Image (tube, rainbow, N blue to C red):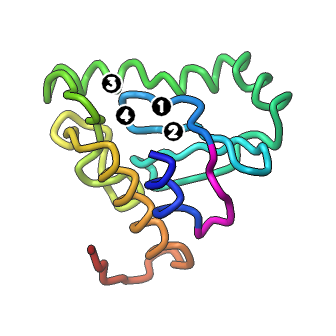
């Protein structure tokens, strides 16, 4: 999965070296070669640094708001009830990402191969990186 993360997202300026954890909605926390901690949220089409080092990351792990956001318990449980259990290497997803109008709603939940989710979200994020609110775009999917 490190290869997929670097291929899809390293345009953000990092080199991912280790996956720290994932959740069933395809979110990934990973470490870089600079010992930074980053989080990919495919449903929000984001990849952001969440900690500059191990000490900051450890503090996050004690932050109840961060943990609740990370676990996504209600969303995952609802997705599971709608589309069923995950198979090996699958994750739940929003069929239409939130960033482009998708809702956290039963009708928008699906399942997708994990690598495909990471690749799609990175590609989409790159295409919309410098858009202004309301600007029109034509997406190109490979």
Residue count near mark 2 (Cα–Cα under 10 Å), binned few <14, some 14–19, many ≥20? many
Q: Position of residue 112 (x, y in %)?
A: 23, 43
Residue count near mark 3 (Cα–Cα under 10 Å), binned few <14, some 14–19, many ≥20? some
Q: Secondary structure at mark 4?
A: loop
Q: Nearer the viewer, residue 78 or 62?
A: 62
Q: Residue at x 73, y 26 (%)?
A: 60
Whether label 2 touches label 1, CB < 8 Å: yes
- State the extent of the magenta-drawn residues as a range: 11-17
Magenta span includes 14: yes
Q: Residue at x 33, y 57 (%)?
A: 101
Whether label 1 touches label 4, CB < 8 Å: no
* Mark carried by residue 28: 2
Q: Nearer the viewer, mark 3 or mark 2?
A: 2
- The answer to whether residue 77 is above or below residue 25 is above
Q: Secondary structure at mark 1?
A: strand
Mark 2–mark 1 Cα distance, whole angstroms, equals: 4 Å
* Mark carried by residue 46: none
Query: What residue is pinned by disc 3?
Result: 76
Whether label 3 touches label 1, CB < 8 Å: no
Q: Secondary structure at mark 2?
A: strand
Query: What residue is pinned by disc 4?
Result: 25
Mark 3–mark 4 Cα distance, whole angstroms, equals: 7 Å
Q: Nearer the viewer, residue 130 or 10?
A: 10
Mark 3–mark 1 Cα distance, whole angstroms, equals: 13 Å
Query: What residue is pinned by disc 1?
Result: 22
Indicate left or right for 64 with 102 as reference.
right
Q: Position of residue 32 (x, y in %)?
A: 69, 48
Q: Nearer the viewer, residue 98 or 129?
A: 129
Tell me the quarter of the picture where residue 66 sits.
Answer: top right
Mark 2–mark 4 Cα distance, whole angstroms, equals: 9 Å
């Amino acid at each position: 999965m490190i290869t997929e993360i670097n291929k899809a997202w390293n345009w953000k300026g990092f080199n991912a070296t280790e996956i720290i954890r994932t959740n069933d909605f395809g979110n990934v926390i990973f470490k870089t070669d600079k010992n930074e901690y980053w989080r990919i949220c495919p449903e929000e089409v984001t990849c952001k640094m969440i900690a500059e080092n191990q000490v900051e990351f450890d503090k996050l792990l004690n932050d109840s708001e961060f943990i609740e956001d990370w676990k996504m318990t209600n969303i995952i449980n609802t997705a599971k009830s709608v589309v069923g259990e995950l198979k090996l290497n699958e994750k739940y997803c929003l069929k239409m990402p939130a960033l482009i109008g998708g809702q956290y709603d039963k009708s928008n939940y699906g399942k997708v191969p994990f690598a495909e989710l990471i690749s799609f979200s990175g590609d989409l994020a790159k295409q919309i990186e410098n858009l202004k609110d309301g600007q029109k775009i034509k997406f190109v999917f490979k």
